[in-house]
Image (cartoon, rainbow, N blue to C red):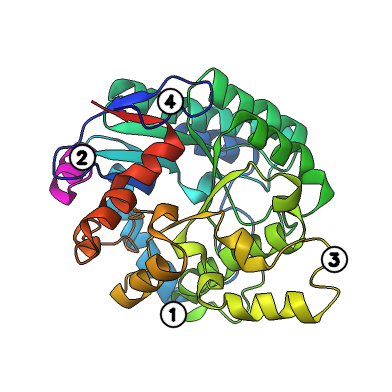
Amino acid sequence: MTITTCGDRQPIRVAARGRHLVVDIHCHLGIPAADAIVQGKYPGPPPGINDFTSAKTSEVNRAQFATIGRTLNTVDTRLADMDRLGIDVQAISPSPGQYFYFTDADTGRAAARAVNDGIAAAVAATPDRFVGMGTVPLQDVGLAVEEMRRCVRDLDLRGIEISSNVNGVDYHDERFRPFWAAAEDLGVLIFIHPLGFTHAQRMSEYYFNNLIGNPLESTLAVGHLIFGGVLDRYPGLRICVAHGGGYMPGYWGRMDHGWRARGDCSEHCTHAPSSYLRKLWLDTLVFDQDQLDSLVRTHGADKLCLGSDYPFDMAEPDPVGFHARLSDADQARILGLNAADLLGLTLT
């Protein structure tokens, strides 16, 4: 059965190994060659990476990367892990640390090309188990559009992963209009995945920059897309937001009230914010059954996709079992059919 052709691209043939097709839309692959490019020009830690990290968090992070480094940066153990977890297909996206928006444009382009070529090579080696998402150098929108077109047309990557902002600039800014227009025209999935909070002076302890900062950044990114009129201007965008869409799906009533009550909240968006929110896809990386049930009830099973965050320590340990108490029809959509539709997969 063909689910979609994902624009004018040919569908990718995949198989379900269990009752339902299972596609993990939120998992990462690191490309060491890209790090080498950036380190050659910008040696040392990326700017800001240690600014809001306590000594204990830095210690835990070092231990984590010492443990998962090979798993993150290669595909050697992935297939065995996928079989153990019940995952048929991974939609592999760049490690968020490889956005490299802080670099100059030429270095950013070279690093992005290295990431995208590396992901495309991993997909080509096992095309029935992996589908690829790329990255683009959004510090230069013209180069970002150029690289996005290369990802789609030359590498057959089916999505572009972006952070929640670009060096503190939010996505309603006019400079990003060519990017959104090109993404809409290409029909490519945009996967929004933050990399900590931009002003996290109060989040250095307890890994708050990730635990609280990542969902907060997702919330801000979605808010700017809605209130800034991006989704009005480009209604054909296909966007999936990590971490269950952040906090907005649980507090959209306040957004709708502000839109009704205040002119500064309704200046750029024509309809109530919740109506735009439901046009976005969200992953189900929320870790709590009641929160999952709430997303199904308020957002809809047709707009949710399984996401694990493999191979990080913040990954859902049982991504398929987490959905087991949902109805069979809802499981089918969330576990794989929705992602298959977004990514252009066809069941054999």
Residue 206: numbered disc = 1
Q: Nearer the viewer, mark 1 or mark 4?
A: 4
Mark 4 residue element? helix
Vertical relation: 301 (above or below) 134: below
Nearer the N terminus, badge 4 or badge 2?
2
Q: Which residue is mark 4?
A: 120
Residue 267: numbered disc = 3
Rounded to the nearest whole Å, what is the CA distance between mark 4 and mark 3? 42 Å
Q: Which residue is mark 2?
A: 77
Place of residue 345 in the rendered image (x, y in percent of width and height, measured from the top left): 36, 31
Q: Amino acid at mark 1?
A: Tyr
Q: Is residue 155 visible?
A: yes
Q: Is residue 32 visible?
A: no
Q: Are marks 1 and 2 in contact (CB under 8 Å)?
A: no
Disc 4: CA contacts within 10 A as few (<14), some (14-19) or many (>=20): many
Vertical relation: 257 (above or below) 44: below
Rounded to the nearest whole Å, what is the CA distance between mark 3 and mark 1? 38 Å
Q: Amino acid at mark 3?
A: Glu
Rounded to the nearest whole Å, what is the CA distance between mark 1 and mark 4? 36 Å
Q: Residue at x 67, y 75 (%)?
A: 256
- Image side of residue 17 versus residue 1, left or right: left
Residue 79: within the magenta? Answer: yes
Q: Nearer the viewer, mark 4 or mark 3?
A: 3
- Image side of residue 104 versus residue 314, left or right: right
Q: Which residues are magenta?
A: 77-87
